[in-house]
């Protein structure tokens, strides 16, 4: 790559949690950052409001390959990070076809656009631990067999394998990051972690009386999104593309998450949490915990924020948000 000119990265899904942290990280590395955003009356720039004068926002859609080709031709990125998806597992059961179109076939359209426009572009695909689903071994590594348990997991698995296929078929520098759950104050309220921390703050302030959740015994490997975007970047700096599991190597239950979140504001979760069958998935993933040893060895990547500190960060941010003290996600 020519280092005389600034590196240029295109991020799909830049308005999401990971996109906002990745944009911040790349800007700190003196990248030019282009954010691909689909035209919609519902697009929210809340997470990147503090970055909008520093990034270029362009129109494009993973459902429309021509728009992807046009964006690549016009902006000529060195790196493309595909973070866009229908990324809520519960929604994927109700909208399986839309999930497949964006989360699966969208990856193919973007890879094909890269193949057509400039095969030297380095590509990152945001894969997911949900691909492991009904886990075949514990912990899960890059060689663990997949058994997804949701339309989202199935769609992510397609995206993962088409990335590998384009790497092998067209010699693209295309890497797949199999990221385990990663959270932050910027997480959407539809995700269980943010639902919990927001409810804790609301209950503490007297604005909510209880918190209704599904399976409290589900186990997840939770890390901080701000740590995980560094792993994405490191993958594209390697000489050869590959697949990497990115995780903490620790597993915690939803119950434990609740316990720590409520305890942060000196409350007992048992007084407020109600188990509601409406929030159980049709097919549940019970235990996810990853093996980060390859990322440690090959990328020299390590998480920095602990599970307890992550929860404290999220509860505190939601408390400040509800009190009107937090004006921005920066």
Image (cartoon, rainbow, N blue to C red):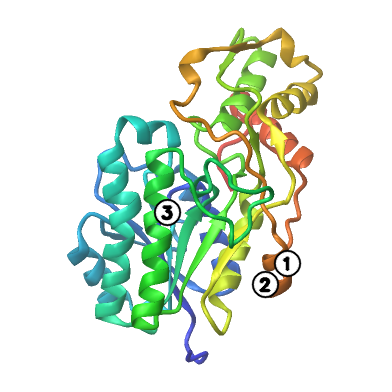
User: Which residue position is annotated with label 3?
Assistant: 157
Q: Estimate how packed mark 3 is, as few (under 14), some (14 to 19) or many (20 or more) residues with alpha carbons within 10 Å.
A: many
- Residue 114 is situated, as x and y percent measured from the top left of the image, at 31, 75
Q: Can residue 13 be seen at all in this image of the molecule?
A: no
Q: Residues at badges 1 and 2 in contact (C-beta under 8 Å)?
A: yes
Q: Estimate how packed mark 1 is, as few (under 14), some (14 to 19) or many (20 or more) residues with alpha carbons within 10 Å.
A: some
Q: For the residues marked 3 and 2, what is the alpha-carbon distance in whole angstroms?
A: 23 Å
- Foreground of the two, 35 or 325: 35
> Residue at left 41%, top 76%?
167
User: Which residue position is annotated with label 2?
Assistant: 299
Q: For the residues marked 1 and 2, what is the alpha-carbon distance in whole angstroms?
A: 6 Å
| Disc sitting over residue 205 in the figure | none
- Foreground of the two, 285 or 271: 285
- Residue 226 is situated, as x and y percent measured from the top left of the image, at 63, 53
User: Which residue position is annotated with label 1?
Assistant: 296
Q: What is the secondary structure assignment of the residue under circle 2?
A: helix
Q: Can residue 22 be seen at all in this image of the molecule?
A: yes
Of pointers 1 and 3, the one earlier in the residue sequence: 3
> Residue at left 59%, top 22%?
215
Q: What is the secondary structure assignment of the residue under circle 1?
A: helix
Q: Estimate how packed mark 2 is, as few (under 14), some (14 to 19) or many (20 or more) residues with alpha carbons within 10 Å.
A: some
Q: Residues at badges 3 and 2 in contact (C-beta under 8 Å)?
A: no
- Residue 100 is situated, as x and y percent measured from the top left of the image, at 30, 47
Q: Residues at badges 1 and 3 in contact (C-beta under 8 Å)?
A: no
* 206, above or below 79, in the image: above
* 224, above or below 283, in the image: below
């Amino acid at each position: 790559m020519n280092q005389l000119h600034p590196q240029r990265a295109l991020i799909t899904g830049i308005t999401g949690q990971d996109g906002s942290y990745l944009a911040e990280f790349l800007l700190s590395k003196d990248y030019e950052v282009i954010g691909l955003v689909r035209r919609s009356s519902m697009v929210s720039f809340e997470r990147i409001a503090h970055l909008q004068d520093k990034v270029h926002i362009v129109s494009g859609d993973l459902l429309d390959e021509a728009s992807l080709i046009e964006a690549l031709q016009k902006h000529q990125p060195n790196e493309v990070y595909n973070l866009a998806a229908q990324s809520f597992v519960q929604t994927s059961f109700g909208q399986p076809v839309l999930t497949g179109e964006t989360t699966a076939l969208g990856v193919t359209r973007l890879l094909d656009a890269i193949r057509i426009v400039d095969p030297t572009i380095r590509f990152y695909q945001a894969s997911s631990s949900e691909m492991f689903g009904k886990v075949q071994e514990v912990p899960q590594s890059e060689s663990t067999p997949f058994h997804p348990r949701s339309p989202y997991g199935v769609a992510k698995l397609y995206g993962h394998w088409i990335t590998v296929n384009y790497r092998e078929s067209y010699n693209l520098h295309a890497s797949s990051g199999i990221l385990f759950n990663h959270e932050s104050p910027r997480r959407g309220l539809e995700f269980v972690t943010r639902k919990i921390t927001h409810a804790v703050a609301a209950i503490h302030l007297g604005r909510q009386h209880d918190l209704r959740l599904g399976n409290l015994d589900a186990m997840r490997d939770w890390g901080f999104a701000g740590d995980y975007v560094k792993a994405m970047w490191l993958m594209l700096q390697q000489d050869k593309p590959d697949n990497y599991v990115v995780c903490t190597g620790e597993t915690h239950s939803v119950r434990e998450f609740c316990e720590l979140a409520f305890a942060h504001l000196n409350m007992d979760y048992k007084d407020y949490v109600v188990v509601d069958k409406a929030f159980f998935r049709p097919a549940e993933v019970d235990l996810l915990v990853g093996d980060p040893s390859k990322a440690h060895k090959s990328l020299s990547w390590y998480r920095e924020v602990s599970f307890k500190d992550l929860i404290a960060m999220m509860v505190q941010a939601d408390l400040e948000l509800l009190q009107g003290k937090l004006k921005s996600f920066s």
